[in-house]
Each structure stands twice: as C-alpha cells, then as structure tokens.
C-alpha cells in the first residue's frame, strides 16, 4: 500500500506544481496584455501601471480567459481592434510567458 500512497502523493504534488505554474504564466501573460493594450490606448507610464493591474484583477472574475478577453475587447472597442486580433495577441503573449518559465 505504501507504494500506492507514494504515487498518489507524487501525483498530487505534480498537479499542485502544474496549477501554480499555469497561474504564473497567466499572470505574466495578463501583464504583457495590459502593456500592449495600454500602448494602443496611448496611456502614460502611470496609467499603464494602473491598467495592467486592472487586467490582472479582471482574470479573477471567473475561471478561464474570457473575463480578460471581454475587458480588453471593451477597452479597445473604439480602436478598431478585432476579436481575432485580441485572441491572437493573447495566444502570442501566452507563449511568450510560457517560454520564460521553462
């Protein structure tokens, strides 16, 4: 039984590690996304910092990325940035964030 218990604990540790890593990647991606969107919006440095925090906080509204997507979509609505462009940028920045944690 001890071998089974050890395996179970090992899987639990791996799951916890993977979840923590995914959280860090998402937070980093959201930071980059906030930087990108704030540049599109023409924000100065102080406004950019505040905006990045608002993007990061938006990710806590619900599970998944839709809450962040909706925020960015609404904020960039008057700048003619399509949903496809936003999704593409999110994917691109997610890959960038992933590469920084490898």
Image (spheres, helix red, strand yellow):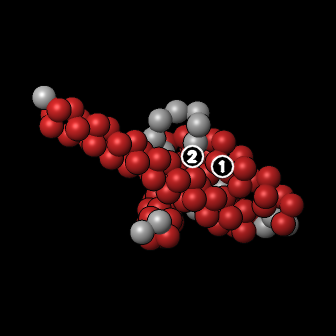
Q: Secondary structure at mark 2?
A: helix
The crowd level at tag 2 (other Cα within 10 Å; few <14, some 14-19, many 20+) is many
Which percent across, then down, holds residue 31? 63, 59
Which percent across, then down, holds residue 87? 46, 58
Q: Is residue 97 visible?
A: yes
Q: How many angstroms separate mark 1 from mark 2 (CA)?
A: 6 Å
**Residue 43 relative to residue 66: left or right:** right
Which percent across, then down, holds residue 68? 57, 46
Name the residue: 28% across, 43% down: 10
**Residue 17 relative to residue 49: left or right:** left
Q: Is residue 88 visible?
A: no
The mark found on residue 68 in the picture is 2
Q: Secondary structure at mark 1?
A: helix
Quarter the N terminus occupies: top left
Name the residue: 83% across, 58% down: 47
The crowd level at tag 1 (other Cα within 10 Å; few <14, some 14-19, many 20+) is many
Q: Which residue is mark 1?
A: 55
Quarter the C terminus occupies: bottom left
**Residue 93 relative to residue 37: left or right:** left
Name the residue: 45% across, 53% down: 21
- Which callout, 1 or 2, points at the residue further toward the start of the chain? 1
The mark found on residue 44 in the picture is none
Q: Does the CB distance between marks 1 and 2 fall below 8 Å? A: yes
Report the label total.
Answer: 2
The outermost residue toward the front is 2
Q: Measured along the vertical axis of the image, is residue 64 above or below residue 37? A: above
The outermost residue toward the top is 1
């Amino acid at each position: 039984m001890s071998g089974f218990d050890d395996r179970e604990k090992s899987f639990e540790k791996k799951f916890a590690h993977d979840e923590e890593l995914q959280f860090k990647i998402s937070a980093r991606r959201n930071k980059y996304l906030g930087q990108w969107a704030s540049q599109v919006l023409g924000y100065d440095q102080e406004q950019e910092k505040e905006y990045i925090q608002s993007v990061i906080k938006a990710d806590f509204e619900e599970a998944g990325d839709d809450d962040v997507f909706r925020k960015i979509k609404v904020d960039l609505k008057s700048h003619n940035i399509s949903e496809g462009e936003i999704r593409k940028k999110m994917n691109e920045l997610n890959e960038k964030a992933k590469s920084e944690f490898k």
